[in-house]
Image (cartoon, rainbow, N blue to C red):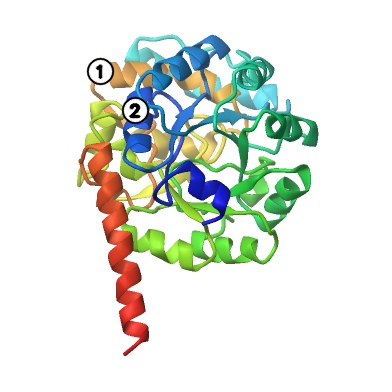
Amino acid sequence: MSSALTDLCRYPIVQAPMAGGTSCPQLVAAVSEAGGLGFLAAGYKTADGMYNEIKQLRGLTGRPFGVNLFMPQPALADPSAVEVYRHQLAGEAAWYETPLGDPDSGGDDNYDAKLAILLEDPVPVVSFTFGCPTRDTLDAFAGVGTYTVVTVTTPEEAQTAQWAGADAVCVQGVEAGGHQSTHRDDPQTDGAGIGLLSLVSQVRETVQIPIVATGGLMRGSQIAAVLAAGAEAAQLGTAFLVCPESGASLLHKQALTNPLFVRTALTRAFSGRPARGLVNRFMREHGPYAPAAYPQVHYLTAGLRKAAAKAGDAQGMALWAGQGHRMARELPASRLVRLLAEELDAARTAVSTGSTQ
């Protein structure tokens, strides 16, 4: 690990920022206290909501932690395509007895207000999803002592992040659960994502800044593999989703190992942007017709997803999960961090021992 990342956590284990309530202060604190690096997800929150969670987290731990921001999205969606999708979802609205949401609820996710708070009252790490900030923004964070990470899905995006002044890149393989953090949402590239090990190797040869690897990682031996490929740390999301401290719903946690859900797929059905989740009825019925319209579709389906969860119907929820979801272990977050670290050490020892024989 680079010295800067080493200073942030005892183990090269990062808990992914999972928006929607999963990455709550309790989970983040437990991970950081155990020697990993916990991340709050500021996406879909108000600026005040983010600030209040940071205050709560600081009351739970004095260890370093990170905050993740969503980059503002360009207005590229076709309103007529969104309207067609609204009509298609009319049956869902009737079934769950809830109105569809307003697709024009906003595309900047309160970005500027969140930046102002984080620059006024700095946190140890800030990461960015769905794009790369300007050099001025990254320089401003450097000026207040905040370590910056830009999530990327291609070597070209990693190069852009390095040129802009990011301290590190989070390299996201196609195996990752939740949204693909492409900097440009191009429907023509749907399904063209790169596997994590290959992507880490390509990015390692493209940039000189540290790499955090993420996508489908569930075991310490997999962490060892991405470190060997050139990463300085590994970021895990689905592995922490089932922890008791996680804010994910019980239905979501149970679905990860429920034999009813046998595979994951990338879909635009719930948000209008490619995201990996467990294949369920909603994804099968609406995924093929969902437009490339984020965050419009996210706001359109928000009420449906909440109503499905309230009704106990996992078939109507966005069950975000990485490809390794069946390997999820329901352990306290602190125990999971320690177990992953033990598995990492065992994997490294096995390789070292094998190389000397």
Q: What mark, if any, has residue 316 been given in the picture?
A: 2
Q: Position of residue 52 (x, y in %)?
A: 47, 12
Residue at 31% x, 72% y is 349
Q: Position of residue 290 (x, y in %)?
A: 54, 33
Q: What mark, if any, has residue 311 been given in the picture?
A: 1
Examine the image and state in which quarter residue 350 appears: bottom left
Give the amino acid at mark 2. Gly
Q: Around disc 1, counting alpha carbons within 10 Å, would you say few (fewer than 14), some (14 to 19), or many (20 or more)?
A: few
Residue nearer the viewer, 44 or 185? 44
Q: Is residue 292 above or below residue 80?
A: below
Asked if one can make out residue 90 in the rendered structure from this viewpoint, the answer is no
Residue at 27% x, 57% y is 342
**Image side of residue 228 versus residue 80, left or right:** left
**Image side of residue 159 versus residue 150, left or right:** right
Q: Position of residue 84 (x, y in %)?
A: 59, 24
Q: Around disc 2, counting alpha carbons within 10 Å, would you say few (fewer than 14), some (14 to 19), or many (20 or more)?
A: many
Q: Is residue 252 above or below residue 156?
A: above
Please tell me which of labels 1 and 2 falls first in the chain. Answer: 1
